[in-house]
Amino acid sequence: MKPCRLLIGLIALGSVSAQPSETDVTVGVPVEGEKGIQRSTAEIMAAQRTASPLRELLRMPEHEIEGREYLPENPNSKAVSSIPDREKGSLSGNLVVTKAGSSSLSGPQTVGVTFDAVTGPTENGAFPPDTMGAVGPSQFFLFVNGRLRTFNKATGTADGVINANPNIFFNSVMTPIAPPVVLNFTSDPQIRYDRLSGRWFVAIIDVPCTSVGCGTLGANRWMVAVSDAASTPAITPATVWTFHFFQTDPRIFAITHRSEWTHRHFTSVATCSLPLPASWERMVMLSERVHC
């Protein structure tokens, strides 16, 4: 059986007014990705066990305003966590100030299981972590730059089902290292457990560097992995993941948000020119048939 294809609808937004005209919104053109590639959790973990250890800390280059790194800090800034200063007993979000300069959590629920999920950057080999995670029926699935790891959500113990570098997990759909690309790694993780379908959606972009030190970058890929229907109760070594990717122009610098609706998944990404919302055809990703 042929794997399915992934359709992504891209929508470029202009200025928004109370009564938008035809010039306010530009409807994007659907993009059809490559055929999905399937790999089991056991295959991925076997590749992880034979992978070479990371030799250096990987960082995605910042793309702020030109010369930002040379700007001095404000010499008049106070060494405090918030401004204006909070008095004792005052509320600040979900924090309550217990004494001058100190605060404690004032959450609506009692904290249950707490555990250390990953230690970075020594353990995951990447910075910043871009911390992400999602909860399923029986597992908590951590996803940060440099590490995917599953836990028993009742105990907080790593269950050993997945403990992999996303470079290994998404290796089958990453941009190949071939001229002009000299180095490639993943960045900006996103993960969701889709309760309507009982599937896991794991997404990330890659960072294909065209020079040593990543001073210049090539067009990158936006990648997503979807678990099979058999993994609804729990991810296991037998879980089969279907990997998709698509390439955009301009280059995606970051994935900023992801949400699920009945028929589509919506994701906001940052490009070199504008924020770009994109919708993923949810049922196509879940289908085991070829979509023409």
Image (tube, rainbow, N blue to C red):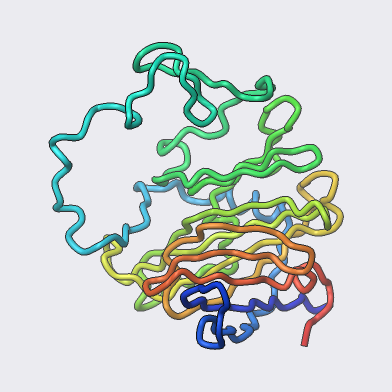
For the N terminus, give its image quadrant.
Answer: bottom right
Q: Is residue 157 visible?
A: yes
* Count of numbered marks: 0
Given residues 27 and 196, the one toward you in this image is 27
Q: Residue at x 19, y 53 (%)?
A: 69
Residue 211 higher or lower than 21, as above or below: above
Image spot of residue 277 (x, y percent): 55, 70
Q: Quadrant of residue 36?
A: bottom right
Q: Is residue 258 above or below residue 56?
A: below
Q: Is residue 219 left or right of residue 277?
A: left
Q: Quadrant of the C terminus?
A: bottom right
Q: Position of residue 218 (x, y in %)?
A: 38, 74
Position above or below: 84 against 38: above
Q: Nearer the viewer, residue 169 or 78?
A: 78
Tell me the residue at 32%/32% (across/down): 83
Question: Is residue 87 or residue 99 the one in the foreground?
Answer: 87
What residue appears at the point 68 percent right and 20 percent down from the top-left corner?
110
Q: Is residue 163 visible?
A: no
Looking at the image, which residue sits at the far top?
A: 99
- On the image, the x and y values in percent for residue 249 come to 45, 80
Q: Position of residue 207 (x, y in %)?
A: 42, 64
- The residue sitting at 49% across, 24% down in the picture is 91
Q: Is residue 183 left or right of residue 26?
A: left
Residue ranking furthest to the front? 18
